[in-house]
Amino acid sequence: LGYGFCHVPAAPGCHALSCVTWRPRGTWRERLRQRLLGGGPQLRVPPEAAGASERFRLRTEAAGTVHLQLGVLLRHFGRFGVEC
């Protein structure tokens, strides 16, 4: 369980991405509960996770790496301001 961020490539084809993830550290009680019951602390406002300017205030710990295999098709990207 964690949060991560990576850019989706704007080039067509198959892409292998690695997304480093993190999670809120929580209090000692939350960490104990996480070990015994699973789950863990969650952000109340998840969009905060995307902005690095807000994330520096959070106490976090590494949660691992997610490896992604993406297939990208280019269709109507120009409508959304993506240049290829």
Image (spheres, rainbow, N blue to C red):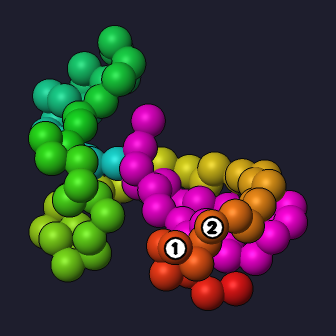
Report whether 23 appears left or right of 8. Answer: left
User: Which quarter of the rendering shows the C terminus?
Assistant: bottom right
Q: Quadrant of the N terminus?
A: top left
Residue 74 location (% of width, % of height): 73, 67
Q: Amino acid at mark 2?
A: His
Q: Which residues are magenta?
A: 1-22
For label 2, the crowd category at 10 Å Cα-Cα, with few meaning under 14, some 14 to 19 and many 20 or more, is: few
Is residue 3 magenta-colored?
A: yes
Q: Identify the residue position indicated by label 2 in the image.
A: 76
The residue at the point 60 percent across, 72 percent down is 77
* Residue under the point 24% across and 48% down: 46
Q: Residue at x 48, y 48 (%)?
A: 63
Displayed quadrant of residue 31: top left
Is 81 on the left-hand or right-hand side of 34?
right
Residue 82 visible in the shown view:
yes
Relative depth, front residue between 42 and 38: 42
Which amino acid, by three-letter code, is at mark 1? Answer: Arg
Q: Which mark is residue 41?
A: none
Q: How many marks?
A: 2
Q: Is residue 40 found inside the magenta-colored segment of the image?
A: no
Residue of label 1 = 79
Q: Residues within 10 Å of mark 1 (few under 14, many from 20)?
A: few
Q: Position of residue 24 (x, y in %)?
A: 26, 48
Q: From mark 1 to mark 2, how far is it between C-alphas?
A: 6 Å
Residue 5's spot in the image, x, y percent? 47, 62
Looking at the rendered structure, the secondary structure element under dot 1 is helix
